[in-house]
Structure formats: structure tokens, C-alpha cells
């Protein structure tokens, strides 16, 4: 029993010391980074916030591009412009593969993205060029190491 208690105390002591050393190393790296770039904590925080806002804008831009392409693809579907349909289908397929599909729980989904993915799902059943573009995009992603 005494041996078990000693082993447990030694393990906990090592755990606490290891965490402390690791934490102090992270703090020191942050200090060196701040000294290197010459930014205060507040400035770093503001840059982080700006970066998040930029990512939100990029996400919105990607959604708007997919909406535009899907609308144009729907209008061209009945015409005799296969190259235009294929080109537009590739953009919609790219959005679908990056941000979808609907059932994927690993990706963040807001209502606008969910609605657009539903429209793409509905459209791909009636547009063979869109279905082919999605399959091609998925094949490219699935073959990358």
C-alpha cells in the first residue's frame, strides 16, 4: 500500500512539474514573439479579431459566388452551352465539397450555408454536369495524401 502511495505521489509530482515546465516554455515563446514583432498584448488581440472578421468575410464571399454560379447554372441548364455549364458547375462543386455536404458534423454550418447546400443537393439530381463536377472534386480531395 505504501509503495502504491509513493508511486502515485511521484507520478502526480512529475505531472505537475511537467505541466509547469511546458507552460513556462509557452509563455517564454510568447514573450519572444512579442519582442520580435514589437506588438503589445492588446495589438495581438486586435490582430486576432481582425483575422476572424476577415475569415467571416471570405466565407460570405464564397457563399455569394456559389449562389451566383448556381443561379447562372440553372438558367443555362436548358440551353446549348455545355462548356459554360461545366465551368459554373465546377465552382458550385468546389463550394459544396469544401463547405458540405449537409450531413457532415465536422464542419461549422450556419443557416445560410445549410440552405445553400440544400439547394445544391436538390440541383445536382437534375443537373448531370453538377453531379459530375462534385464527383470530380471529391475524387481530387480523396486522392490527396
Image: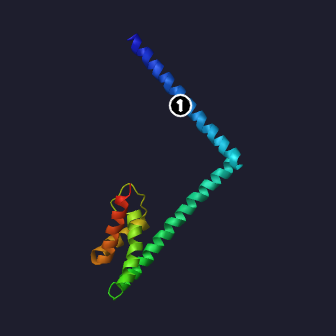
Q: Nearer the viewer, residue 84 or 108?
A: 84
Q: Residue furthest top?
A: 2
Q: Quadrant of the N terminus?
A: top left
Q: Position of residue 103 (x, y in %)?
A: 32, 60
Q: Is residue 35 visible?
A: yes
Q: How is the image coloured?
A: rainbow
Return the x and y of residue 83 as percentages of the image width and height.
37, 82
Q: Which residue is mark 1?
A: 19
Is residue 124 rendered to the left or right of residue 21? left
In the picture, residue 86 is in which quadrant? bottom left
- x and y, in percent, of residue 112 in the image: 43, 68
| Camera-nearest residue between 39 and 142 | 142
Q: Residue at x 36, y 55 (%)?
A: 105
Q: In the rendered image, which quarter contains the C terminus?
A: bottom left
Name the element at disc 1: helix
**Residue at 47% from the left image edge and 18% from the top image edge:** 9
Tell me: residue 91, above or below residue 142: below
Q: Residue at x 39, y 15 (%)?
A: 4
Residue 74, above or below 103: below
Look at the picture and state if 55 lies above or below 27.
below
Query: In this image, 138 relative to 37: left or right?
Result: left
| Pointer 1 local density, CA inside 10 Å: few below 14, some 14–19, many at least 20 | few
Residue 138 percent across, percent down from the top left: 34, 64
Amino acid at each position: 500500500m505504501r509503495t502504491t502511495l509513493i508511486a502515485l505521489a511521484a507520478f502526480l509530482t512529475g505531472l505537475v512539474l511537467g505541466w509547469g515546465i511546458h507552460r513556462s516554455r509557452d509563455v517564454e515563446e510568447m514573450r519572444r514573439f512579442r519582442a520580435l514583432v514589437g506588438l503589445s498584448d492588446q495589438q495581438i488581440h486586435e490582430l486576432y479579431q481582425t483575422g476572424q472578421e476577415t475569415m467571416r468575410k471570405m466565407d460570405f464571399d464564397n457563399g455569394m459566388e456559389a449562389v451566383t454560379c448556381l443561379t447562372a447554372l440553372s438558367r443555362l441548364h436548358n440551353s446549348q452551352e455545355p462548356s459554360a455549364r461545366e465551368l459554373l458547375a465546377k465552382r458550385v462543386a468546389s463550394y459544396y465539397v469544401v463547405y458540405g455536404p449537409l450531413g457532415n458534423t465536422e464542419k461549422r454550418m450556419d443557416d445560410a450555408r445549410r440552405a445553400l447546400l440544400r439547394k445544391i443537393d436538390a440541383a445536382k439530381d437534375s443537373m448531370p454536369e453538377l453531379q459530375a463536377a462534385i464527383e470530380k472534386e471529391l475524387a481530387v480531395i480523396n486522392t490527396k495524401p
